[in-house]
Amino acid sequence: MLSQTQILTWLQAVKDPEIPTISLVDLGVVRAVAVDEATGGVTVQLTPTFAGCPAMDYMRRDVERTLLAHGVPSVRVEISLREAWSSDMLTEGGREALRAHRLSPPPVLGNVVFDLDFLEYAECPNCHGHNTELRTPFGATLCRAVHFCFDCKQIFEQFKPI
């Protein structure tokens, strides 16, 4: 009998198509896994980081392919917008994976925002300095913002906190 733990272990191999150093599990996109005891089929619930995320079809296919390759007899992937994704859903491993991709991970907000100053500054993924500023909230994708580090004089992207 398959377990949720085994499924989540296999899903660690499924990477975000835009950030190939981070798994969908560590990104917090995999929200639920259910195993049907009678059939062995698996249902995986995914929540996109942004409602209009263009990578969701790729993610769905990669989840299906990975589980089918491990012998799961049937896989259903549901995209859910019931509960919004939050950057607090990133695991510590996910934050390290963002750093490995030279993206600054968002701060942990505890799902509470007292002011918007946290948008202005980010830790530089190159020198780990905090003497940074937001240059534009519009990065290469919807989930990234562009910052500048005054210490190492590098422009870098931050995974947006939401």
Image (cartoon, rainbow, N blue to C red):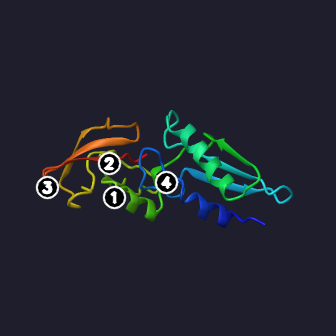
Q: CA distance from mark 3 to mark 1?
A: 16 Å
The residue closer to the viewer here, 150 or 112, is 150
For numbered disc 3, what is the local secondary structure?
loop
Q: Are marks 4 and 2 in contact (CB under 8 Å)?
A: no
How many residues crowd mark 3 within 10 Å: few (<14), some (14–19), many (20+)? some
- Residue 24 vs 135, above or below: the answer is below
For numbered disc 1, what is the local secondary structure?
helix
Residue 47 visible in this rendered orientation of the protein: no
Mark 3 = which residue?
Answer: 152
Mark 1 = which residue?
Answer: 99
Residue 14, image x, y percentages: 54, 53
The residue closer to the viewer here, 147 or 121, is 147
Residue 158, numbered circle: 2
Residue 42, image x, y percentages: 73, 53
Mark sitting earlier along the chain (4/3): 4
Q: Residue at x 40, y 41 (%)?
A: 143
Q: Residue at x 17, y 49 (%)?
A: 154
Mark 4 = which residue?
Answer: 27
Mark sitting earlier along the chain (3/1): 1
Q: CA distance from mark 4 to mark 3?
A: 28 Å
